[in-house]
Amino acid sequence: MHKAFQFRLNPTKEQAILIHKSMGCSRFTFNHFLAKWNEQYEQTGKGLTSCASLLTQLKKEFDWLREADSTSLQNALKNLADAFSRFFKGQNDKPRFKSRKNPVQSYTSQCNHPKNGKPTIEVAGNKIKLPKLGWVNSLNLVK
């Protein structure tokens, strides 16, 4: 079973900076692989197949990508793959580059349940624990 929740956060200044960095890293990852995909498609007529291993190389090339939650970067790749899948099915237009000027910015984190430990996301009262951010105050649950 899958569950999704949305929270309205009230982060500290340091947490807000990390949130903005995570959004920027996710946007950069999406745009980087969209450019690579387009380039590969023009040259060979086929798109990229294994972006996950390329993401590891990209994180080695750009140290600042390690500041972001790793699942947010993986979700950016999943979003790109979904966008291309919908495009080839004729459901959507071709994926476009993401802009920092867009008034709506977001990133998606994922709750992983390790076998011998605590999950990466926890909720306690009016706080939520997020990867790389720690405990963040939340104003209310958005339904």
Image (cartoon, helix red, strand yellow):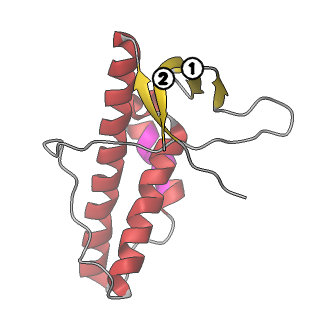
Q: Is residue 134 magenta?
A: no
| Outermost residue, top side | 13
Residue 92 x, y percent position in the rendering: 29, 78
Q: CA distance from mark 2 to mark 1?
A: 5 Å
Disc 1 residue type? Lys
Q: Residue at x 75, y 41 (%)?
A: 113
- What percent of the width, then of the height, locates residue 48? 42, 71
The vertical placement of 55 against 118, above or below, is below
Viewer-side residue, 49 vs 83: 83
Query: Residue 25 vs residue 6: left or right?
Result: left
Q: Nearer the viewer, residue 72 or 36?
A: 72
- What residue did someone put label 1 on? 127
- The amino acid marked with disc number 2 is Ser
Determine crowd level at label 2: few under 14, some 14-19, many 20+ residues with C-alpha closer than 10 A: some
Rendered location of residue 107, percent (x, y): 40, 43
Query: Residue 81, located in which quarter of the rendered image?
Result: bottom left
Toward which corner of the image does residue 121 lie, by quadrant?
top right
58 lies above or below 42? above
Q: Earlier in the sequence, mark 2 or mark 1?
A: 1
Front residue of 16 and 43: 16
The reply to whether the magenta stretch includes residue 55 is yes
Secondary structure state at the residue bearing disc 2: strand
Region in magenta: 54-59
Task: Please tell me whether residue 89 is drawn above or below residue 116 in the rendered image.
Answer: below
